[in-house]
Image (spheres, helix red, strand yellow):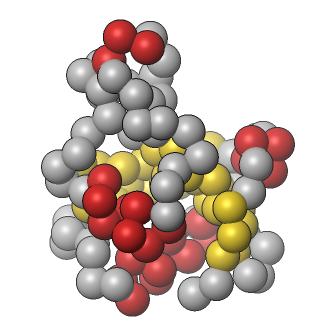
Amino acid sequence: MKFEKANGSNANGTCYQDIVYTDYESLVGVFGKPNYGPLASDDGDKVTCEWILKFKDGTIATIYDWKTYSGTPMGTYGWHIGGFDKGASIRVREALLLHDNVVAQ
């Protein structure tokens, strides 16, 4: 599953599509360092960590924590997947499954 890091403007207009249960290190192992974060809870934002990805087929996906209020979660967590459609969730899950890093829901 080929993808590249995208910038924030690529994600304008995306919205929540799904949740995937995995940990921070697994996400870094598959997608590299996040575009944003990780941050501590006192940074005051609803999102403390986010990946913005563009897959080879043009699908844009974001992976982010949402309102954790205790900083970026490092253990198993329900990471939100954003995109323009459900294709974002499919691409993220495929990439994670290839690396066996998804906790079944």
Kindly identify the residue that appears in the image at 44 percent across and 11 percent down.
44
25 sits to left or right of 12: left
Let me know if residue 93 appears in the view.
Answer: no
Q: Quadrant of the N terminus?
A: bottom right
Residue 6: x and y in percent read 74, 57
Kindly identify the residue that appears in the image at 27 percent across and 83 percent down.
100
Kindly identify the residue that appears in the image at 76 percent across and 82 percent down.
57
Eyeballing the image, is 46 above or below 55? above
Residue 93: x and y in percent read 43, 74
Q: Quadrant of the C terminus?
A: bottom left
Let me know if residue 36 appears in the view.
Answer: yes
Eyeballing the image, is 5 above or below 95? above
Q: Quadrant of residue 48?
A: top left
Q: Quadrant of residue 29?
A: bottom left
Residue 34: x and y in percent read 52, 50
In this view, the residue farthest toward the front is 33
Q: Quadrant of residue 13?
A: top right
39 sits to left or right of 78: right
Kindly identify the residue that appears in the image at 50 percent across and 67 percent down.
31
80 sits to left or right of 25: right
In front of the other: 86 or 93: 93
Eyeballing the image, is 20 above or below 104? above
Numbered-mark total: 0
56 sits to left or right of 46: right
Residue 15: x and y in percent read 62, 44
